[in-house]
Amino acid sequence: MATTMEEQVQEVLDKLRPFLLRDGGDVELVGIEDGVVKVRLMGACGSCPSSTITLKAGIERALLEEVPGVKELEQVF
């Protein structure tokens, strides 16, 4: 079982990764600062017009539900 917030976030990202890979994209954890998780979308996800929806409705919602202490998800380029 994951112990640190970073490990917990990585676990959630790993669960979501197959869905992103199926569409030709991927996600990379850049860092966590004061409960704000910073990720970089790569591949097709980086330029997809739906990437904001993927971030907020998909990834952020999963992180808020599953990782205590996460306040927000932010995309970095």
Image: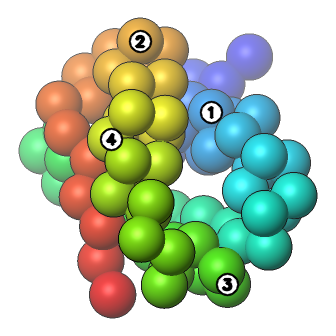
Q: Which residue is mark 4?
A: 56
Residue at 47%, 48% (x, y): give it: 54
Closer to the camera in the image, 66 or 20 = 20
Instruction: Check disc 2: other Cα within 10 Å, few if <14, some if 14-19, many if 20+.
Output: few
Kindly state the secondary structure of the residue where label 4 is placed: helix
Residue 52 place in picture, x, y as percent:
33, 57
Quadrant location of the N terminus in the rendered image: top right
| C-alpha span from label 3 to label 1 | 19 Å
Label of residue 43 in the image? 3
- Mark 1 residue type: Val
Residue lying at the far left of the rendered structure: 34
Mark closer to the chain start, 4 or 1 = 1
The span from disc 2 to disc 3 (Cα, nearest Å) is: 26 Å
3D distance between C-alphas at marks 2 and 1: 10 Å
The crowding category of the residue bearing disc 4, from other C-alpha atoms within 10 Å (few below 14, some 14 to 19, many at least 20), is some
Q: Residue furthest front?
A: 49
Quarter of the picture containing the C terminus is bottom left
x, y percentage for residue 50?
44, 60
First reached walking from the N terminus: tag 2 or tag 3: 3
Badge 3 marks a residue whose secondary structure is strand
Query: Closer to the observer: label 2 or label 3?
Result: 3
Above or below for 5 versus 77: above
- Whether residue 46 sits left or right of residue 10 in the image: it is left
Mark 3 is on which residue type?
A: Gly
**Residue 61 in sight:** yes
Q: Position of residue 39 (x, y in %)?
A: 41, 64
- Give the mark nearest the N terminus, 3 or 4: 3
